[in-house]
């Protein structure tokens, strides 16, 4: 799967997502895009999953008809995220178009 990390997602998490291609918004030059335009750009570039720490995205975006899935991490703290890499990887592996999953970290 192609995975896109939103701002706030610790980049070292990339190492825990084996078998996936992971890019960041910064690497793509998309740091200034708002959520709607970001999802459009990610879908146009065939990303399967957006991993974010933006807990408000679920209220701001309607995922009906979207081809991208969203995994929301409920913390930005790397030590907490690091302890849950397995759960996060499982959420990414199980992601399906239009699905939103929150991972408590």
Image (tube, grey):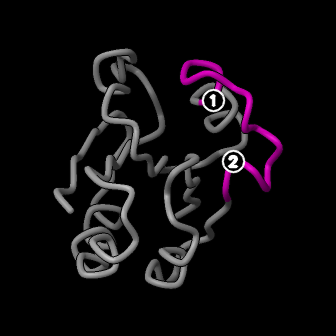
Q: Circle 1 — which element?
A: helix
Q: Residue at x 36, y 64 (%)?
A: 77
Pick the quarter of the image with the C terminus. bottom left
State which region is magenta. Answer: 24-38
Within 10 angstroms of label 1, few (less than 14), some, or many (20 or more) residues?
some
Q: Circle 2 — which element?
A: helix
Within 10 angstroms of label 2, few (less than 14), some, or many (20 or more) residues?
some
| Apparent side of residue 18 relative to residue 24 in the rendered image (left or right) | left
Tell which circle, 1 or 2, labels the residue nearer the N-terminal end. 2
Q: Is residue 11 above or below residue 9?
A: below
Query: Horizontal and vertical percent for residue 42?
Result: 64, 38
Q: Residue at x 21, y 47 (%)?
A: 102
State which quadrant residue 22 falls in: bottom right
**Closer to us: 16 or 26:** 26
Q: Is residue 93 above or below residue 48?
A: below
Query: Horizontal and vertical percent for residue 47?
Result: 60, 48
Which label belongs to residue 75?
none
Q: Residue furthest right?
A: 29
Residue designated by label 1: 38
Residue designated by label 2: 25
Q: Residue at x 56, y 54 (%)?
A: 5
Residue 37 among those drawn in magenta: yes
**Closer to us: 55 or 45:** 55
Q: Is residue 16 above or below residue 21?
A: below
Query: Horizontal and vertical percent for residue 38?
Result: 63, 29
Tag 1 near tag 2, CB within 8 Å: yes
| Apparent side of residue 82 relative to residue 38 in the rendered image (left or right) | left
| Apparent side of residue 24 relative to residue 28 in the rendered image (left or right) | left
Query: Horizontal and vertical percent for residue 35?
Result: 55, 24
Q: For the residues marked 1 and 2, what is the alpha-carbon distance in whole angstroms? A: 9 Å
Q: Residue furthest left?
A: 104
Residue 10 among those drawn in magenta: no
């Amino acid at each position: 799967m192609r995975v896109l990390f939103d701002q706030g997602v610790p980049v070292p998490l990339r190492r825990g997502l084996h078998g996936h291609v992971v890019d960041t918004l910064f690497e793509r030059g998309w740091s200034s895009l708002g959520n709607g335009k970001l999802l459009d750009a990610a879908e146009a570039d065939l990303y399967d999953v957006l991993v974010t720490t933006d807990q408000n995205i679920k209220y701001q975006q309607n995922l009906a008809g979207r081809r991208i899935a969203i995994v929301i991490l409920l913390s930005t703290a790397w030590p907490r995220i690091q302890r849950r890499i397995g759960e996060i990887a499982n959420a990414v592996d199980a992601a399906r178009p239009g699905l939103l999953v929150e991972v408590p970290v």
